[in-house]
Image (cartoon, grey):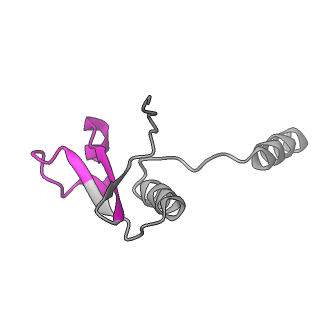
Amino acid sequence: MARTYKKDYITKVATNYHMQFRIADWMRELPAFKNIPRSQVVFRKTLKTSDYETAKQRSEEVRIKMQVHEKPFNADDIIRDLTEEKISA
């Protein structure tokens, strides 16, 4: 059976899901990582849920709050922004 790789930064430990990822050098400049010692190279946080979909949503919310992951773009927002630029020009 082939294993699939998903880059969602989520692992299951016992019954709960946890978020974990390697702290890159550029992340050390972000406010969320200022107080983390350089010796700590992996960020881990429990998502306190046994449901994968809930864990995925919470993980994305935490990464956005920490400024590690941008909000997914919405096509309607992009179209509106482009329309506003044309109107103002």
Left or right of 38 in this view: 69: right
Left or right of 30 in this view: 88: right
Q: Is residue 56 above or below residue 21?
A: below
Q: Check residue 51 for magenta coloring.
A: no
Q: Check residue 17 for magenta coloring.
A: yes
x then y, percent, for residue 24:
28, 38
Left or right of 11 in this view: 67: right
| Frontmost residue, 77 versus 61 | 61
Q: Residue furthest left?
A: 39
**Which residue: 82% across, 43% down?**
79
**Which residue: 9% across, 45% down?**
39
Indicate the quadrant containing the C terminus: top left, top right, bottom left or bottom right: top right
Q: Residue furthest top?
A: 2
| Frontmost residue, 24 versus 80 | 24
Q: Would you identify the image quadrant in which residue 17 lies?
A: bottom left
Indicate the quadrant containing the N terminus: top left, top right, bottom left or bottom right: top left
What's the magenta region?
A: 16-43
Q: Residue furthest right?
A: 87
**Which residue: 38% across, 66% down?**
47
Q: Is residue 24 above or below residue 15?
A: above
**Which residue: 35% across, 65% down?**
16
Instruction: State the count of labels.
Output: 0
x then y, percent, for residue 64:
48, 55
